Amino acid sequence: MYLTHFHMTEKPFSLTPDTQFFLNDRSHRDALTTLRFALQDGEGFIKIVGEVGTGKTLLCRILLTRLDKSRFVTAYIPNPCLTPDELKSFIATEIGADYQRSMPTHELTSATYRRLLQIARQQKRVVLVVDEAQAMPRETLEALRLLSNLETEKRKLLQVVLLGQPELDELLRREDLRQLTQRIVFSEKLRPFNTQGVAAYLRHRLRASGRPKVNLFSPVAIWLLARASGGIPRLINILAHKSLLCAYGRRDKTIGGWHVAKAVRDTPECTASGRFWCRLWGLNGRVFLPRSPEVAR
C-alpha cells in the first residue's frame, strides 16, 4: 500500500523470515560463527536460545543456505511436535534411507545407520536442524539423543542443532534429560537490539527494500521504537509497519514520534516502558530523550 509513497520495491518489515533482510549483527553473527565452527568440527549437539521474535527461524534459514551442499546433508524440522517414531521416519526420509513405513523400529534404525555410513564414506556430514525445540516432547528428545549415538570410531554420524525459546533451557534442566544436556558442546543466546542496534536494523531493512534514502525514521521515532519493542526484531517489524501505514494515511514523508506512538497504542505486546513514553508523547507532543543519540546516523 505504501511502497510507492516511500519509494520502496518490497515491504521492509514483513514478518515472514526472508534471508534478504538478514542483519548480521553481533549476536546473530556470534551464533552463526559458533554453528558453522561446531558443525565443521563434527560436534554432536549445538543449542541456540532466544526470546520469541529474536530471529531464530531466520537464523535457521541463513545456516541452511550457507552450508556447503558438497559437504553437508541437511534436514530441517520446523514443527518438532513429533512422536519418536515420526522423528525416526522423518530423518530416514530426509537422508534417503532405504526403508518401508511398515518396518519395525529396530529395522528402521538399522536402515538409517546404513545410510548415515554411506554419507560418511562420501566425506559428508548430516545435520539435523530443529526449530522451536522447546516444543519437542521429552520422549522424542530422548529418541533424538539415542539416534545421536550412531557413530564411527572417528566421529558422530548425526549432528543436531536445537533452536528454541528460553523454555528449552528449562526443559533441558530436567533430571531425566541430563544425558542429552551433557552432549550439548556449544550454546549461544540471541539478544535483543539496543537503541543503536534498532537504528542499524531499520536502515538495513529500508536499504534492502530498495529505498534510496534510509533516514526515514527520526531519532525520536527510533528511540520510541527501541523502548516499545524491547529490541525484539519481530516487534520492531510490527511497529515500524504500522508507523509507515499511519504516515502513509497522512501523506507524511518521514516517521516521527507521533506515528510510532499511534502504532504502540495499537499493539498490546509492547513493553510497559514504551507505552508510558508514548502516552507522554500523546499528551504533550514532546519526549525529552536521555543523552544518547547518534541513533539516526
Image (tube, rainbow, N blue to C red):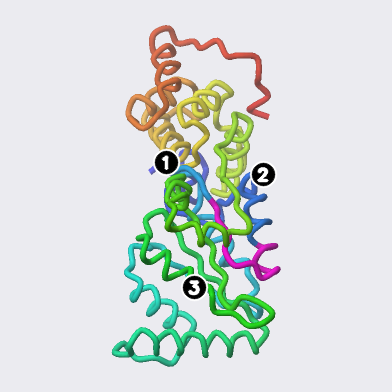
CB contact under 8 Å: marks 1 and 2: no
Q: Is residue 99 magenta?
A: no
Dot 2 falls on a residue whose secondary structure is helix
* Labels 3 and 1: the sequence-earlier one: 1
Label 2 sits on what residue type? Arg
**Left or right: 203 as drawn, with respect to 241:** right
Determine whether the residue tagged by mark 3 lies in a helix, strand or loop.
strand
Residue ID for mark 3: 75
Label 1: state its secondary structure: loop
**Residue tagged 1:** 2
Residue density around tag 2, few if under 14, some if 14–19, many if 20 or more, within 10 Å: few
Q: What residue lies at 51% left-to-right and 49% top-to-bottom?
A: 55
x then y, percent, for residue 66: 63, 66
Residue 120's image quarter?
A: bottom right
Q: Residue 116 falls in which quadrant of the image? A: bottom right
Q: Residue at x 47, y 73 (%)?
A: 146
Q: Position of residue 218 (x, y in %)?
A: 56, 25
Name the outermost residue toward the top.
284
Is residue 177 positioned above or below 239 on the image? below
Name the residue type under label 3: Ala
Q: Residue furthest front?
A: 175
Q: Position of residue 106 (x, y in %)?
A: 39, 86
Distance in Å between CA atoms under marks 1 and 2 = 31 Å
Q: Earlier in the sequence, mark 2 or mark 3?
A: 2
Q: Which residues are magenta?
A: 36-48
Mark 2–mark 3 distance (CA, rounded to whole Å): 26 Å
Going from the N terminus, do you reach mark 1 or mark 2 first? 1
**In the rendered view of the protein, which quadrant contains the C terminus?**
top right
Q: Residues within 10 Å of mark 1 (few under 14, many from 20)?
A: some
Asked if marks 3 and 1 touch (Cβ < 8 Å), the reply is no
Mark 2 highlights which residue? Answer: 26
